[in-house]
Image (spheres, grey):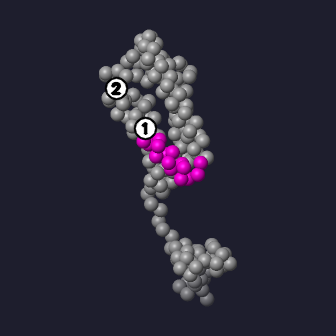
């Protein structure tokens, strides 16, 4: 007579193995019957053999164009808020890391005017991203491409015509451009 322990570990006892789900288990047969033969075969075999996740899909789920536009909207709104809270001269001084005092900027009417135009451009970008997040996928891709073009086209201006000779690309602008361009490029690449 066998002991309980021997019975538990007997070789002739069937081992437990988890069931493997196939396409037939997941897709109802009445739906599978409507599919062409090649599609039926591909679905059953594709679902039966699980693929290991890639490093990109594990670390960062796919970024959609809608989400990239929402990210741009949020970053643009956060970037523009200090302009409306502090005013154009203080915002410009903050943007130049204090290298140009607010009083000096306030004396230059053209510079103040240009900062107002820039703020309105950012409000327009914020509104456009808000609306475009509700567009169809093809239109969202086009808006993302336009945003990438705009952001890349703005970068050389900080070298060609800097606000201050000792100032290149200001840190807030670096953060703004990095986050927005990266999110749009990842969304366009389908990563």
- Near-viewer residue (59 or 101): 101
Q: Main secondary structure of the magenta part?
A: helix
Is 29 inside the magenta-drawn segment?
no
Label 1, label 2: how many angstroms apart (C-alpha)?
A: 16 Å
Magenta residues span 135-150
> Where's residue 23, x and y in %?
59, 75
The quarter of the rendered structure image containing the N terminus is bottom right
* Residue 158 left/right relative to 32: left
Counting labels gives: 2
1 and 2 marks in contact (CB < 8 Å): no
Question: Dot 2, crowdedness within 10 Å: few (<14), some or many (≥20)?
Answer: few
Of pointers 1 and 2, the one earlier in the residue sequence: 1
Against 154, residue 45 (above or below) is below
State the residue in front, 46 or 14.
Answer: 46
Q: Mark 1 points at which residue?
A: 151
The secondary element bearing badge 1 is classed as helix
Image coords of residue 91 (percent x, y): 48, 21
Q: Nearer the viewer, residue 69 or 2?
A: 69
Residue 161: assigned label: 2
Q: Position of residue 157 (x, y in %)?
A: 36, 30
Which residue is located at x 55 percent, y 35 percent?
Answer: 126
Dot 1 alpha-carbon crowd within 10 angstroms: few under 14, some 14 to 19, many 20 or more: some
Determine the residue positioned at 35% across, 25% down. 162
Q: Residue 191 carries which label?
A: none
Please give left or right for residue 172 compared with residue 69 in the image.
Answer: left
Q: Residue 147 lies in magenta, yes or no?
A: yes
109 lies above or below 30:
above
Q: Residue furthest bottom?
A: 1
């Amino acid at each position: 007579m066998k002991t309980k322990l021997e019975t538990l570990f007997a070789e002739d006892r069937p081992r437990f193995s988890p069931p493997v789900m196939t396409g037939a288990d997941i897709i109802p047969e009445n739906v599978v019957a409507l599919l062409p033969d090649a599609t039926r075969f591909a679905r059953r075999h594709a679902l039966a053999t699980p693929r290991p996740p890639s490093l990109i899909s594990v670390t960062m789920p796919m970024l959609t164009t809608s989400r990239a536009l929402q990210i741009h909207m949020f970053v643009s709104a956060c970037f523009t808020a200090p302009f409306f809270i502090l005013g154009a001269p203080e915002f410009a001084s903050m943007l130049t890391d204090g290298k140009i005092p607010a009083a000096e900027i306030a004396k230059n009417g053209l510079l103040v005017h240009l900062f107002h135009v820039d703020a309105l451009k950012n409000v327009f970008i914020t509104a456009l991203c808000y609306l475009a997040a509700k567009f169809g996928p093809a239109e969202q891709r086009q808006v993302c491409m336009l945003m990438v073009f705009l952001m890349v086209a703005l970068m050389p201006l900080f070298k060609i015509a800097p606000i201050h000779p000792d100032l290149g690309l200001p840190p807030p602008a670096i953060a703004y451009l990095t986050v927005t361009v990266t999110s749009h490029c990842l969304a366009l690449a389908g990563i």
